[in-house]
Image (tube, rainbow, N blue to C red):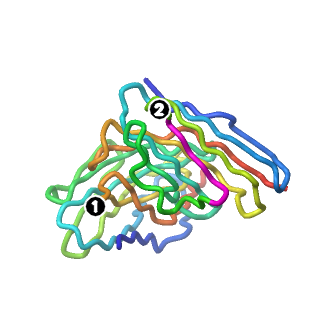
Amino acid sequence: EAEVAQSPRYKITEKSQAVAFWCDPISGHATLYWYRQILGQGPELLVQFQDESVVDDSQLPKDRFSAERLKGVDSTLKIQPAELGDSAMYLCASSRWATGNTIYFGEGSWLTVV
Amino acid sequence: AQKVTQAQTEISVVEKEDVTLDCVYETRDTTYYLFWYKQPPSGELVFLIRRNSFDEQNEISGRYSWNFQKSTSSFNFTITASQVVDSAVYFCALSGGTNAGKSTFGDGTTLTVKP
């Protein structure tokens, strides 16, 4: 069964350093999401792409976070500079289309900022 | 604004007991979708079920069943004859409105099934 691929699985970085996460969605899925999940909470949407275009980035801290999906397939989420409060799991997900469609998640990338 | 409330933070049961996880949602949209996901310790969110707002039929899948009631804005999840492998965090989610692709999640219920 096709899966959403993410890397790295775990990342420890020092405060003020840059960090990047990569995601490859399920083939054929036009919609790609990046969610952040803080321990003990539910996932929160950071950014949503439809093909290569950003649909929703209202919760993305744009002063330090950036995301791109240049060819409408895989995507990169970058944090620069990382802060202690960024420690969380970053989940990538995809769906065939946006409206009401089931979202399939990757295994997530655990980030610890020290 | 959309909101999902999972009032039960943690539930602990003994194997073979039945357990119900509650989910209450708020939305002004007439068309919306509800989901349940399971998150085992490995971290991946596993899709369990999707229900649209026009389909109030309850659903049963093996030991899992879901009760959707629009009148009380609830979408509860019952596990019958629980097993240790059911131990996980369960999330209820809601999507709809201007960005129907965006899902709003509750904070999850941690279920522990003891042998």
Q: Position of residue A77 (x, y in %)?
A: 60, 44
Classify A104 as above or below B55. Answer: above
For badge 2, the amino acid type reads Pro
Q: Is residue A107 left or right of residue A103?
A: right
In what quadrant of the picture does the N terminus of chain B appear? bottom left
Q: Position of residue A63 (x, y in %)?
A: 64, 60
Can you identify the residue that label 2 sits on?
Answer: A25
Chain of the residue under label 2 = A
Q: Which stretch is magenta?
A: A63-69
Name the residue: 68% across, 50% down. Answer: A79
Classify B73 as above or below A10. Answer: below
Image mark for residue B98: 1
Closer to the eye: label 1 or 2: 1
Image mark for residue A62: none
**Same chain for marks 1 and 2?**
no
Q: Is residue A17 left or right of residue B50?
A: right
Q: Quadrant of residue A84?
A: bottom right
Name the residue: 36% across, 27% down. Answer: A28
Name the residue: 29% across, 69% down. Answer: B74
Name the residue: 77% across, 52% down. Answer: A112
Q: Quadrant of residue A109?
A: top right
Which element carries disc 2, helix, strand or loop? loop
